[in-house]
Image (tube, grey):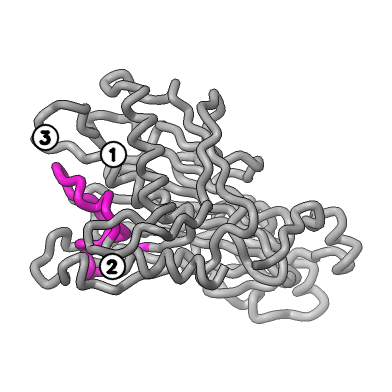
Amino acid sequence: MRSKARHLAVTTVALAGLFGGLSTGSSQAAQNPSDTEKSPLAAYCDSDRAVPADVIGRTVSLADCDLRGRLIKVGDLGVRVPTQENKGVTYSVQLSEDAAPDQPLSINVRRHDGKVTTTVRRAGDPAVGTKSAPAKCDDGEYAFSKDGDSWDDDPMEWRFNQGSVPGYLDGETIKNEVTESADNIDFGRNNCGLAEDLDSDDATYEGTTDSGTNIGLESCDDEDGDSVVAFGDRRAGVLATTCAYESWWFGWYIDEADIEINDNQSEAPFLRAGNTCFSEFYLESTMTHEFGHAFGLGHVPSGHENLTMTPSADRCSNDKSYLGKGDYNGLHELEVTD
């Protein structure tokens, strides 16, 4: 286990003294032209425009292009470069089955050692329900949001904004479904005969709150130390979004996660308790997937559509509230390596 040391988080002010300050791309280039100056990124270094992820590439030195606080975008997803060193954030979405196949699934941006690293993952062809996908209890595939980082010594202490539940749903019922979803991940609930004893203690429900999430329509906002689940405005084709915030202390770990659920019934209809399903989605399946992101799991690639962590959801099915073999193995790996 890594030792928690949040009180040692380095601020931007301290970094100026530690690294001697950070110059912009233009001032650096005036003294010593760099590869960055010659690249398409140079046009963005001295502006406030959102920076396309494909322009940045994999890694950029802040000494060549000062991207602190800048919005990095891929499609409709965006993440701001942390203003503090040793911080990172991942923006992940779960799609409805009829979403565009080239939809970006997640973008991760990390700031560490004077550099910004960006990682983007796309859906490709979701092919929900494809016949080529192995049965969930036979499919051992899993993926991490980034490098297999999970929560450290402290659990995810989260709250639910029950007042944000849209009027067509019952708030108390929805609260119970959301907390049940967190337990599905925390204990490793499955119908594959695997022991439901992960009991990672990575999620502790702390009650309701009036606070919202730090998730904008297209980007993760700055973290505030509170993990919140709430309904809110999401883009069409997106059922829910998770922003997982990271810190670095001799290794990356998650220290906050917010989840926002689409509150638009026409775009993301969730089944009301006791009703017959026609074309709705089960909230428990959606939220089990999202808590998987909050714990550090990523989307599995195409060809594994029967697992909980596939990027697209099935209508009228709650099957993905139970973990498949790969989902379970991924969570187990996160616990072993934590």
The percent coordinates of residue 283 (x first, y second) are 28, 39
User: Which residue matches tag 2?
Assistant: 325
Label 2 amino acid? Lys
Q: Quadrant of the C terminus?
A: bottom right
Which residue occupies the foreground of this view, 101 or 244? 244
State which mark lies toward you, 2 or 1.
Answer: 2
Residue 2 placement, left or right of 216: right
Query: Which residue is rendered at x = 46% and y = 64% of the image?
Result: 145
Tag of residue 255:
none
Give neighbour class at mark 2: few <14, some 14-19, many 20+ (Cα, 10 Å): many
SS at circle 2: helix
User: Which region of the structure is painted magenta?
Assistant: 299-323
Cβ–Cβ below 8 Å for labels 2 and 3? no
Q: Determine the CA span between mark 2 and mark 3.
A: 27 Å
Q: Which residue carries the number 3 mark?
A: 277
The residue under label 1 is which amino acid type? Leu
Q: CA distance from mark 2 to mark 1?
A: 21 Å
Q: Residue under label 1, please give it.
A: 283
Which of the pair 128/283 is nearer the observer? 283
- Mark 2 vs mark 3: give the one in front: 2
Q: Residue at coordinates 78% horizontally, 72% vertically from top-left?
A: 28
